[in-house]
Amino acid sequence: MTKKSVLNKSVLRKLILLSVVSNCLYTGVVLGADVTSDSYTLDPIVVTAQRTETRELETPAATTVLTKEDIKNTGAKTVFDAISFTTGITNFSYGAGGLDYGSMDSRVNIRGLERGALILINGAPINLNGKNSLSGLLPENVEKVEIVKGASSTLYGAEAMGGVINIITSTPETDYVKAKVGVGNLGFKQYLVSAGNKDFNIAVGKEFFGAVDRTSPNRKDLDGKRKYEYYNERGKGDLFNIALNAKLSERLDLSYMRSESNSTYGQIVVPGTLTKTKTTEAKESKRYHYNDKKNNVSLTYDYDNTKALVFYTDRDLYGESKNLAANKWTENASNYLARKYGVDIQHEWSLRDNKDSFIGGLLVSRDTYKGTAAATSNVKAGRNNIALYGSYSYEINPKLTTILGARFQKIADPVNDQNVFMPQWQMLYKLDEHSSIYSNVGKAFTMPNLSDTFKYVNGGYQAISGPNLKPEEGWNYEVGYKHVTEKDSWKVALFYMDFKNFFDWAPDPDTGKNTVRINGGKFQNTGIELDYKHLLSDKLTLSLGTTYSNPKKQEIGVSTWNQAYPKLQFNAGLNYTDDKLDAGIALNWLTKRLKNRDGGTNPDLINLNAYVSYAFSKNDTVQINLNNILDRHNVITNGAWEYWDNPFNYTVSYQHTF
């Protein structure tokens, strides 16, 4: 059989699968025409933006709420990928689906700002050592995701410079027991069992994924140091996940999540390119294996306008490597254990006959970082935080409301203690019952990673001093318009971001290597975001979004500005649902991207997904997911080093409810 005939059969299979989805959607257009939805709202309740319940139309910030159905409609197999179909969200990943490459983490970025998103699970922060990885989180565990774009440090503290993403886990109201099994190409297998009632639910899952021969182009030896070209590959791996939610009492809720993944990556010499003597291609080719454990637990008290949150999160990363000529693995120096724990208490007061409200709160938390390899056994660092925050909402008249907020945070840091003050001012004007305009001005900050407080010297690590090191900080300015009716919603946001003191590396006086953290760079972005959603019927929904911006960064000691992230994004979705049949197509397109290390430009990322789900009975459902239907080498990193997403892949799953 010729290569051409194999290719033609592969294309034919994809077209057949896609035609199934298209026919389902066409059927939905015909059968569901001219009906208004009563079960789906375009003006959902938002909690994260103001730390209290508000309708999205009455929230003076750019917000997006992704329901469980919205996540399903993207066709994505991970929460990380599903979020990337949101306007203004640009993911960065070394592995498909947000899989971390050891300490080279995947991350979610808002409005082109690297390290600019604070991730919460049920309101509890999970960022560790400056990283916000979502690897290990399954869509089956999630009820909805609330995304707030714009500086949010006033209410949430460090790392919320671009915004906040709050992932709210499932809390069922009826008794159930479910079992799900899924299989696909690329060695994918999934097993999931879940059970619960109105007071308790638990889900346990295991996933397996196969090897991918290439996850990057050939990397040229630009500086002549390696004496060979190489490419990256991914080996087999697996992911274990458990999620538990319990209603301990009418006022007290417990949430716990744990994930453990095993992944293997290769850095392989391109045959025939090795010019170094006294070595072999096998000796220069390496494989890296990682075991990654994560825990998140929170206890929430909610009664009579008082909320208290006790939270704990950790990550234990162990990696090892070997060349292809060796039999023994050697531990990596980047292995570490990071923890975050604390208490956050707030109370809301109603004032002036419920026209106004004031939210005041206290946060006490601690972050720790410890190296767990032999080379990093002396690497230990901790940071203590105590913060007071408040937000006053004042109704000037029934149409006009202003909100003033502020946060004072005292930080005991191993390098340089900090006292930060973060103000915020918002305005909301209701044009009519369906429309509003708003403004949002806020300041935000980020602290250095705890691992940055050490430098490598003579085979070991030493603590460094940095009395002049300051937090990254800056301002977000935004105005927006929202229009929501029973059938459609329009959202437009214009924003300007201006941040300084961006962290950079400087030469160490002892070694001359860039291992000392300093402040220096600047970041700016000006852009516009547009979102449109239309209920074509009670069964068919159309979603469109786009953002155009100019994210740019100025490095230390230079006057020029360089592009920092992709400038243009489009996303679209068409979804059909009825009692038995669900189907959808979703598109995420990134263009005007960054330069790569070979002098070219990252190619457009065009990710087209689809799914079909059919319930044969009230207890039995079959679903087909199609990912990267166009089978592109989608570059899921941004900038110099290009890593590819999975090629075209599919999953067929069956779920039974007992």
Image (cartoon, rainbow, N blue to C red):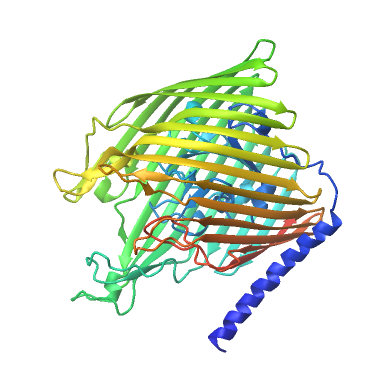
User: In which quarter of the view is residue 174 placed?
Assistant: top right
- In the image, residue 65 above or below residue 293: above
Q: In this orientation, which residue lies closer to the viewer: 528 or 46?
A: 528
Q: Quadrant of residue 434?
A: top right
217 w.r.t. 114: above or below: below
Relative image position of residue 521 (x, y in whole percent) = 32, 40
Whether residue 148 is visible: no
Provide residue 480's location: percent of width, then percent of height: 59, 34
Instruction: Indicate left or right for 602 with 488 as reference.
Output: left
Residue drawn 58% across the image and 56% down it: 588
In front of the other: 435 or 537: 435
Position of residue 11 measured from the top left corner of the image (x, y, whole percent): 62, 76
Name the residue located 58 percent from the left edge and 31 percent from the top edge. Answer: 49
Residue at 60 percent across and 37 percent down: it is: 63
Q: Which residue is outermost to the bottom?
A: 1
Residue that extends furthest to the left in the rendered view of this protein: 510
The single residue placed furthest to the top in the displayed view is: 352
Residue 198 falls in image quadrant: top right
Q: Nearer the viewer, residue 601 or 160?
A: 601
Indicate the position of residue 219 as horizontal and vertical percent values: 34, 67
Identify whether 637 is placed above or below 499.
below
**Is 497 positioned to the left or the right of 333 in the image?**
right
The image quadrant where one finds the N terminus is: bottom right
Seen at 27% across and 72% down, the residue is 228
| Residue 84 appears in the rendering | yes
- Residue 266 falls left or right of residue 138: left
Tell how many labels: 0
